[in-house]
Image (tube, helix red, strand yellow):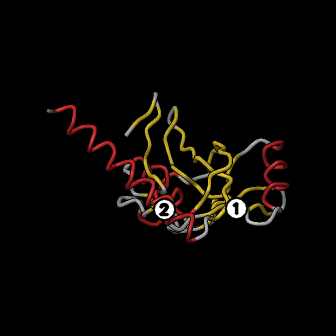
Amino acid sequence: MSRGGVKVVARNKKALHEYHIEDTYEAGIVLTGTEIKSIRQGRVNLKDSYARIDGGEVYLLNMHISPFEQGNRFNHDPTRTRKLLLHKEEINKLIGLTQQKGFTLVPLDLHLKNGFAKIQLALAKGKKLHDKRQAVAKRDADREIRRQLKQKMMR
């Protein structure tokens, strides 16, 4: 998968279902040598990961990067906490927004841009169960409308 010179390595599909996305930020990640090699092989999972602000810095927790097969003793802990690189103004803005009730930082995708691993971080608010049901019903209705239109066009 790629979009305009950027190769998307992993997506957090669950995030769009679980959260309302308010705003997005692109952040760099502090990685070790074996981690970037595993990412380039696509061996990464964002499913249960989230970001937290601690001491004026942003950290990504629970992102699983599989150990590099040829990494021997230099391999890393697959789910270690990783520091994210953002501008100070962005971090200060996020500190103010995440202190509001219900807001959290969720990774949407991990991509390679000019050889560097970047994470698309979203400021998000959790959906309630009825919101999820409405989203599924709307998606099903849209799919049915597209199917009906396609059938009419083929006649």
Image quadrant containing the C terminus: top left
Task: Say which mark, if any, is on residue 104.
Answer: 1
Image quadrant containing the N terminus: top left
Measure the C-alpha gap from mark 1 to mark 2.
14 Å
Q: In the image, what residue occupies the spot 16% across and 33% down? A: 154
Task: Say which mark, if any, is on residue 14.
Answer: 2
Dot 1: what SS? strand
Percent from the top left, x then y, of residue 117?
A: 54, 44
Could you tell which of marks 1 and 2 lies nearer the N-terminus? 2
Camera-side residue of 54 and 115? 54
| 70 horizontally vs 147: left or right | right
Percent from the top left, x then y, of residue 43?
A: 39, 57
| 20 horizontally vs 77: left or right | right
> Is residue 118 positioned above or below 14 on the image?
above
Q: Three-letter amino acid code at disc 2?
A: Lys
Task: Say which mark, if any, is on residue 142.
Answer: none
Q: In the image, what residue occupies the spot 49% across and 55% down? A: 35
Q: Residue furthest top?
A: 4
Q: Quadrant of residue 69?
A: bottom left
Q: In the image, what residue occupies the spot 59% across and 60% down? A: 19
Crowding around mark 1 (Cα neighbors within 10 Å: few <14, some 14 to 19, many 20+) is: many
